[in-house]
Image: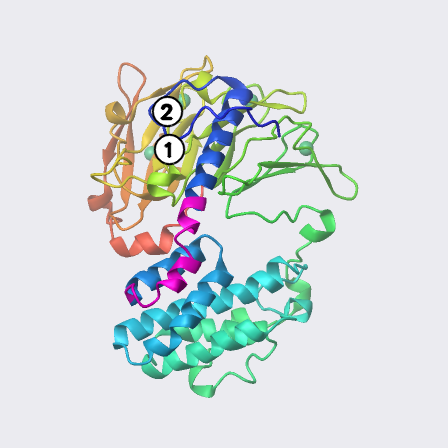
Amino acid sequence: MNKPSSPKYQSMNWVTNYDVKPGTTGMVELLDSIYRWDEKRKNEQSQISPFNKLVHVFYKSRQQLLSGARELLHEGETNEAIHILEELSDEIVNESDELFTKYNELLAIAYLRWGEQENCIINHNHNSCILPIKENGIYALQDNTRKAIEVYLKLLNKHPDDWKYRWLINIAYQTLGEYPSKVPKQWLIQSELMVDKDSSDNFKNIAPLLKVDETSGAGGAVLEDFNNDGLLDIMTSGLLSTNQLKYYVNNGKDGFSDQTIPAQLEGLTSGFNIYPLDYNNDGWKDLLVVRGSWGRLNGRYPNSLLRNNQDGTFSDITVEAGLLSFMPVATAVCADFNNDGWTDIYIGNESVVNTEIEKANELYINNGKGQFIETSVQSGTDINAFTKGLCAGDYNNDGLIDLFISNHNGINSLLKNNGNDDKGIPQFVNTTITAGVGNRFLVSLLGFGIMTTMVG
Ligand SMILES: [Ca+2]
Ligand SMILES: [Ca+2]
Ligand SMILES: [Ca+2]
Ligand SMILES: [Ca+2]
């Protein structure tokens, strides 16, 4: 990737400075500046962790150290988190039940994760991480998982009714090839998920064989025929600022070829989710990328719209299309909300009230000329929440696409489409309460489960 010689953005001023060049070059420069900023931020944070935390172990509260360890876990620095937690172990013994539980929960997760990292990620194979875990999916390196089991046994002795601990200790034993035989009877969970009934019915993970087993942060994946040859291709993304968008073209014989660079996608990094759409009705699938999820104030990344140029390449047209926005985003949905034959885009922002990232969801109506007009207020879709899942579909069969919005720590929303006003803007009415779908309980269950497959 060609890095700009002098970074234009030394701080997060891209959020207020909208002087972003159009096209792929402009977006790559912008993403590169965000990458640099993110690295600088992490470096500054690393100066206070983990080693300084160890040095200051007697000067900082246990809570602060636990928070530091949790942050390291979130950053993927599992080993360092374990160092801090192990240093604390003698002091936790005489602490309150609450702190004892918090500490041990974190320690157990850290051990489990380290076991997963060293087995499933570093030594990945086609059976890794697929339930029921079997054959060479069983961990070769077992020490950390055994430590996790020890901690879960302690936690279960104090909290015997906690099903999370019970589930995780069963999983842990299975990763060692010791489920159900070695699981203590009182904690054993008999589940169909855990039993290999007939392996011929199982899906096989052939990603390693096809060389599409990219390791990256959590992200999106799309199976779509991007080059219109009748064969499904693959596009993937990962949320981190270092994660390159990847494009694999199906060769119709024995696998896929990585066409990321020929497709001129190099430097287009990060993406918590990606969505195919044909925004210009030319019969070639384009791609929407949303970025910044879970980053909160540090997640103010732009989204991207990539136009399929019909020749194996894509161009970033976010700025030209009027879609530039800087919010943490996990989800979007593409559908024709005003029934004019042009695909529109609804973006779910992770809004946090009374902060710099308080911003309602956005409805971009496609004007059929390559641009989108933001109409969330006029259309009644300006839901201000920490949105994690979106679904578009015609739930009342009136021919108008409705919206369901799943929010983290908030009420979900069902918006009924009542048709267009005289300007062609769809008018939505919030029917959450009358339809009986505003239950907060649904939020945690559906937060990640809602996909866009009901569109149409
Ligand atoms: Ca294809
Ligand atoms: Ca297209
Ligand atoms: Ca439309
Ligand atoms: Ca409808």
The amino acid marked with disc number 1 is Ile
Kindly indicate whether the residue at mark 1 contacts the one at mark 2 (C-beta within 8 angstroms): yes
Give the residue drawn at x 42%, y 50%: 47
Work out whether residue 69 can be spotted. Answer: yes
Is 376 in front, or is 141?
141
* Local crowd size for mark 2, using a 10 Å CA cut-off: few (<14), some (14–19), many (≥20): many
Work out whether residue 190 can be spotted. Answer: no
Residue 364 circle label = 2
Is 354 in front, or is 233?
354
Q: Give the Cα distance between marks 2 and 1.
A: 8 Å
Task: Residue 250: give x, y in percent of width and height.
Answer: 71, 37
Instruction: Please tell me in which quadrant of the rendered image residue 96 appears.
Output: bottom left
Is 385 in front, or is 41?
41
The amino acid marked with disc number 2 is Tyr
Give the residue drawn at x 32%, y 41%: 405
- Split into quadrants, the picture shows ligand 1 in the one at top right
* Local crowd size for mark 1, using a 10 Å CA cut-off: few (<14), some (14–19), many (≥20): many
Which image quadrant: the C terminus?
Answer: top left
> Which residue is situated farthest in the right direction here?
253
Which residue is labeled 1 in the image? 347
Position of 112 with respect to 71 (left or right) is: right
Magenta stretch bounds: 43-61
